[in-house]
Amino acid sequence: MEHIRGGRTWVTRDQVSEGRTEDGGRFKTVRDQRGHDVTQETTPVGRERQHVRINLP
């Protein structure tokens, strides 16, 4: 078994998901190493919003 010392692996990197909302807008959600989610959303008419969900231990 190989062990990686230091550095970043796919487990410690931010996880990104992108897609479309039900009304046709676009979104991008980034989950960091601690489980916090930041969602950037663009509505079909071009308004931009940002939502943050903080994971408290």
Image: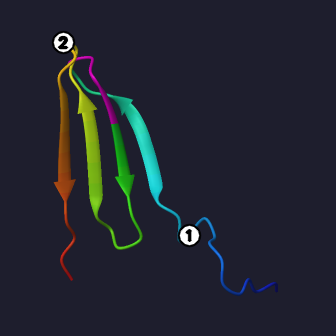
| Vertical comparison of 53 with 21: above or below | below
Classify 8 as above or below 15. Answer: below
Picture disc at residue 23: none
Mark 2 or 1, nearer chain start = 1
Residue 38: within the magenta?
A: no
Q: Name the residue carrying label 2.
A: 45
Q: Which residues are magenta?
A: 23-27
Q: Amino acid at mark 1?
A: Val
Horizontally, residue 12 falls left or right of residue 5, namely: left
The residue type indicated by label 2 comes to: Val
- The percent coordinates of residue 35 (x first, y second) are 33, 68
Counting from the top left corner in percent of width and height, residue 1 is at 82, 86
Let me know if residue 25 is in the magenta part.
yes
In screen coordinates, is 53 left or right of 8? left
Name the residue: 73% across, 83% down: 4
Give residue 27's position: percent from left, percent from top: 32, 33
Residue located 47% across and 60% down the image: 14
Asked whether, in this view, residue 57 is left or right of residue 2, the answer is left
Nearest-to-viewer mark from 2 and 1: 2
Decide: few, some or many residues near mark 2? Use Cα within 10 Å; few <14, some 14-19, many ≥20: few
Relative to 50, residue 3 above or below: below
Identity of the residue furthest to the top in this view: 45
In the picture, the quarter occupied by the C terminus is: bottom left
Secondary structure of the residue carrying tag 2 is loop
Q: How is the image coloured?
A: rainbow
Residue nearer the viewer, 20 or 41: 41
Q: Secondary structure at mark 1?
A: loop
Identify the disc placed on residue 11: 1
Residue found 38% across the figure and 52% down from its top: 30
Characterize the magenta stretch by its predominant secondary structure.
loop
Name the residue at 41% across, 71% down: 33
Q: Check the image and report above or below for 47 versus 29.
A: above
